[in-house]
């Protein structure tokens, strides 16, 4: 039987393989906005954070030569 930590680790690994967590948050925000549960201004903030954060991460990875 799997412990709770093992289940969480398996879920994290699966999500990482499918998509990044930031993209998952952005997709959830888009779905919430689509269904009217999120204001468009909040969606713009989330989108800006997603794009800005991802750009910084990509730049650091490229500078360090990790990919």
Image (cartoon, helix red, strand yellow):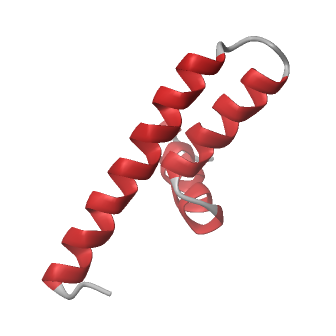
- Quarter of the image for the C terminus: give it: bottom left
Q: Is residue 5 visible?
A: no
Q: Is residue 8 above or below residue 32?
A: below
Q: Which residue is drawn at 24% across and 75% down?
A: 61
Residue most extreme to the left? 64
* Residue 41 x/y as whole percent: 56, 18
Question: Across the whole image, how many numbered discs are drawn on residues?
Answer: 0
- Taking 36 as reference, is 23 left or right? left
* Residue 52 x/y as whole percent: 36, 49
> For residue 37, which quarter of the picture?
top right
Q: In this view, does 42 lie above or below 61?
A: above
- Taking 17 as reference, is 45 left or right? left
Q: Which residue is drawn at 49% across and 32% down?
A: 46
- Taking 30 as reference, is 6 left or right? left
* Residue 53 x/y as whole percent: 34, 49
Q: Which residue is drawn at 74% across and 23% down?
A: 32
Q: In this view, does 56 lie above or below 7?
A: below
Q: Nearer the viewer, residue 65 or 41?
A: 41
Q: Is residue 36 visible?
A: yes
Residue most extreme to the right? 35
Q: In this view, does 27 lie above or below 53?
A: above
* Residue 64 x/y as whole percent: 14, 81
Q: Nearer the viewer, residue 21 or 63?
A: 63
């Amino acid at each position: 039987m799997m412990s709770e930590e093992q289940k969480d680790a398996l879920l994290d690994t699966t999500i990482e393989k499918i998509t990044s967590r930031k993209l998952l948050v952005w997709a959830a925000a888009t779905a919430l906005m689509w269904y009217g549960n999120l204001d468009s201004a909040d969606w713009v903030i989330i989108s800006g954070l997603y794009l800005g954060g991802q750009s910084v991460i990509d730049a650091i990875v490229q500078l360090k030569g990790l990919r």
